[in-house]
Image (tube, rainbow, N blue to C red):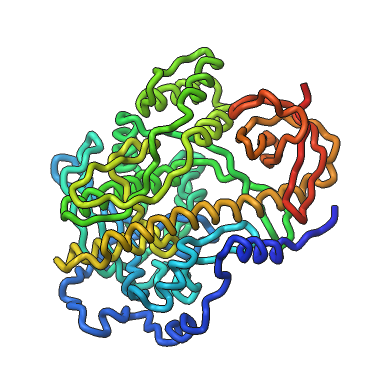
């Protein structure tokens, strides 16, 4: 197999998509003045007395093993009436990245971190996102805390938001925590075992997750399990494609983030503040989803219903767990992409169809997404009873930019995934594979192989194929230089 270093392609793809791949000199000069212990706003005039000292609580984080841009830490405590108090500390990135600073303008240019599997291009310079503004283990940090009290049915009894100092006592990873929570091992992850009390803390967080997730599913949230292969690269050279399946720890963090983002949207709305929300509209291709259900011997109502779709997905997961990821992928494609939109004061919230919530503000990843950083500034203004830092027109411009850049980032990441897959498939031209159709439009018909999970375009025999169809395809070509993988449908 010919070895390809995909790092030059990653830089080229980023540049062609209009992304900055390195901070400009004004940002570098600002970074030289960073004081990690005290954000610039506290060095100036902010009243530190309004910041709660919560460093004594048993905060911990769960993320991917390789992640260093840690945006949140978690803590739970059992309250009276068996309620669970859940506190999520979100990195106070705004404290180190003042609005309209050179670093802020650089972040607005990209609006998101881009993860190619070969290289990571962070929205904020690593000096910030992997150091000063990352909630690293064993260090004190400033955070914005969203504080929820969850009843036994998963409902939120009370909610509040405030600023605090926190201390991350353990940096954990999804796979190790899941193996323990799911009973695949009796051994607590070593990073958790060395911290007294963390075992009980994780069990309580897991209980809170079960409550939140059960309520979401009752409300009609869609529970997908899609397959997205990421390249494993060593020195820029691809050695494998890997799929990260959902597990208990991922569900835990996902449930917490949904609860927080929904709460933040409500808090901003209740305060009369215009905000940026993540919208997933009612699907335009609902008729095709209905057709898929019929083809599987099931049914859906003629009008879009997240509750009915959630029930259908649950039935299919139980009936055919092996092919459930393929069905999930088909439905995700047909639902369409989300977008950022401004929700104005007093206006009805359009909501997030897939999550079955009416308000959803991205707020939990300010190191990685610009919309979250903007939302953090709005929240801090509410906390401080200060005027909103943005006019609605400015928020609309930011929302449009974030939507466009998020779409561009997905294209870059997809291009590198395809190039990595082409590297692994280049010596299998002529082989026949089982696949599922993942896209069908005037732009072309695309399919993903079941094994390996690589995606390409069907350039022969694609007539009549639609999203969700199972198909056999022959590999015609695989070009790592372009990332193009071409198939012919085998009838």
Q: Would residue 293 be found to the left or right of residue 158 on screen?
A: right
Q: What x and y, as percent, mark residue 133?
A: 40, 71
* Quadrant of res 237: bottom right
* Quadrant of res 326: top right
> From the viewer's perspective, is residue 31 above or below residue 150?
below
> From the viewer's perspective, is residue 408 above or below residue 462?
below
Q: Quadrant of the C terminus?
A: top right
- Which residue is found at the position 49% from the left and 64% from the top? 110
> From the viewer's perspective, is residue 383 above or below residue 293?
below
Q: Would residue 258 be found to the left or right of residue 121 on screen?
A: left
> From the viewer's perspective, is residue 282 above or below residue 53?
above
Q: Foreground: 69 or 449?
A: 449
Q: What x and y, as percent, mark residue 102?
A: 42, 78
Q: Would residue 187 be found to the left or right of residue 260 on screen?
A: right
Disc count in the image?
Answer: 0
- Which residue is found at the position 75% from the left and 48% from the top? 422
- Which residue is found at the position 70% from the left and 36% from the top? 451
- Which residue is found at the position 33% from the left and 56% from the top? 74
Q: Would residue 83 be found to the left or right of residue 409 on screen?
A: left
Q: Is residue 77 visible?
A: no
Outermost residue toward the top in this view: 297
* Quadrant of res 144: bottom left
Q: What x and y, as percent, mark residue 349?
A: 26, 43
Q: What x and y, as percent, mark residue 40?
A: 31, 81
Q: Is residue 52 visible?
A: yes
């Amino acid at each position: 197999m010919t070895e390809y270093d995909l790092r030059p392609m990653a830089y080229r793809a980023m540049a062609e998509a209009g992304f900055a791949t390195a901070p400009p000199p004004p940002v570098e000069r600002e970074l030289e003045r960073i004081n990690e212990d005290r954000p610039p706003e506290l060095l100036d005039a902010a009243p530190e007395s309004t910041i709660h000292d919560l460093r004594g609580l048993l905060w911990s984080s769960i993320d991917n093993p390789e992640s260093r841009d840690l945006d949140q830490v978690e803590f739970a405590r059992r309250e009276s009436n068996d309620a669970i108090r859940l506190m999520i500390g979100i990195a106070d990135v705004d404290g180190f990245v003042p609005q309209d600073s050179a670093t802020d303008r650089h972040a607005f240019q990209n609006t998101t971190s881009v993860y190619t599997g070969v290289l990571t291009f962070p929205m904020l310079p690593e000096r910030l996102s992997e150091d000063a503004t990352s909630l690293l283990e064993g260090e004190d940090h400033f955070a914005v805390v969203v504080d929820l009290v969850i009843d036994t049915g998963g409902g939120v009894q009370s909610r509040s938001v405030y600023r605090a100092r926190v201390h991350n006592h353990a940096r954990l990873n999804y796979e190790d925590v899941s193996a323990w929570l799911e009973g695949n091992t009796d051994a607590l992850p070593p990073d958790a075992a060395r911290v007294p009390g963390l075992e009980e803390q994780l069990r309580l967080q897991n209980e809170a997750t079960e409550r939140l997730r059960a309520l979401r599913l009752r409300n009609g949230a869609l529970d997908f399990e899609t397959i997205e292969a990421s390249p494993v690269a060593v020195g820029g050279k691809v050695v494998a494609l890997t799929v990260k399946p959902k597990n208990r720890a991922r569900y835990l963090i996902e449930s917490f983030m949904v609860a927080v983002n929904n709460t933040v949207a409500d808090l901003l709305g209740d305060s009369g503040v215009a905000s940026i929300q993540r919208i997933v509209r009612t699907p335009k291709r609902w008729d095709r989803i209905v057709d898929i259900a019929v083809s599987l011997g099931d049914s859906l109502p003629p009008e879009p219903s997240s509750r009915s779709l959630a029930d259908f997905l649950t039935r299919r997961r139980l009936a055919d767990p092996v092919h459930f990821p393929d069905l999930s992928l088909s439905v995700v494609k047909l639902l369409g992409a989300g977008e950022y939109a401004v929700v104005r004061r007093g206006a009805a919230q359009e909501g997030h169809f897939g999550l079955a919530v009416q308000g959803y503000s991205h707020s939990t990843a300010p190191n990685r997404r610009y919309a979250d950083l903007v939302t953090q500034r709005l929240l801090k203004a509410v906390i401080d009873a200060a005027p909103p830092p943005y006019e609605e027109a400015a928020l609309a411009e930011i929302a449009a930019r974030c939507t466009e850049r998020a779409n561009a980032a997905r294209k870059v990441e997809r291009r590198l995934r395809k190039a990595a897959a082409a590297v692994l498939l280049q010596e299998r031209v002529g082989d026949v594979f089982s696949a599922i159709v993942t896209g069908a439009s005037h732009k072309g018909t695309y399919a993903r192989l079941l094994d390996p999970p690589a995606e390409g375009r069907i350039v022969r025999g694609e007539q009549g194929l639609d999203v969700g169809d199972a198909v056999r395809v022959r590999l015609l070509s695989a070009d790592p230089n372009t990332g193009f993988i071409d198939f012919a449908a085998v009838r």
